[in-house]
Amino acid sequence: MCSQGCQHNKEVEISQCDEAKSFLSLTMVVAGHEAVLSCPYASKASMLVVIWKMKCSTCCLLAYRSDHNETRKINCSERMMWKYSPDSDPDLRIYPVSLGDEGNYTCEIISSAGTFLFFSFLTVIVPPTVTLTFDKSTGAVCQASAGKPAADISWIPPNNHSISEVHHPNGTVTRVSSVNTTLSTVTCLVTHPLPLLPGRA
């Protein structure tokens, strides 16, 4: 008899202020969940223009102009929108998050007090699909498919086991572990660790 277990972390956000007019936010979100990227403007001066830029200047652009009370959306997925009213809280909402959303985002606010830049890096976590099979020739085979980052596989009780992995073009990894045992019961434990954040050790 074989059994399996799986666990993964859902969301972590780490933010820090670099200087008076800039802000760095590192966010990790599980694929399929909601991501909210902060644009925490705190000045008392009224906002004139808010612009969200996704990854590159030719990609998605989300903008708000206060004097005309006008919003514009260029080359953006329908999954990307303002979390709240941009005149009061210009956070960006992405739902549901997909692996292709991972990367750099910039929020630029122009006001009478100057230009404020808020940088975000979004990391998308993909839980693996776990399967467990058994046959007489290979024994128990535990597979954690298309996870990001790669899942860790261990066995209970501990056994000498083989492990292999395949890296897919989209950044996900499939790991396969097998163990040949005479025990009547073995457990495959699949754990899904958090990835390292950019610039962090």
Image (spheres, helix red, strand yellow):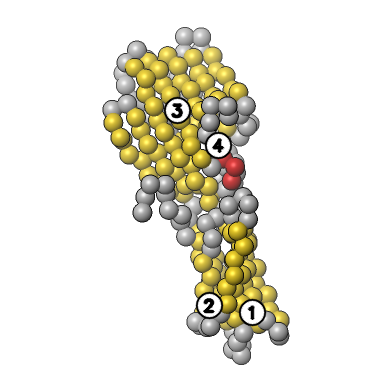
Q: Amino acid at mark 4?
A: Ile
Q: Amino acid at mark 3?
A: Cys
**In x, y percent, where is residue 173?**
59, 59
The answer, for residue 45, to whether it is visible in the render is no
Task: Name the residue that disc number 2 marks.
Answer: 155
The answer, for residue 48, to whether it is visible in the render is yes
Distance of label 4 from label 3 (alpha carbons): 14 Å
Task: Name the residue that disc number 1 marks.
Answer: 140
Does residue 127 sit above or below 134 in this rendering? above
What residue is at 62 percent from the left and 84 percent from the top? 180
Distance of label 2 from label 3 (alpha carbons): 46 Å
Task: Name the residue that disc number 3 marks.
Answer: 107
Of the residues under marks 1 and 2, which one precedes in the sequence? Answer: 1
Task: Name the residue that disc number 4 marks.
Answer: 94
What residue is at 46 percent from the left and 54 percent from the top? 195
Q: Are marks 4 and 1 in contact (CB under 8 Å)?
A: no
Residue at disc 1, secondary structure: strand
Q: Residue pushed farthest top?
A: 67
**In x, y percent, where is residue 11?**
46, 49
Q: Are marks 4 and 2 in contact (CB under 8 Å)?
A: no
Q: Are marks 4 and 3 in contact (CB under 8 Å)?
A: no
Q: Are marks 1 and 2 in contact (CB under 8 Å)?
A: yes
**In x, y percent, where is residue 93?**
52, 34
Q: Residue pushed farthest left?
A: 20
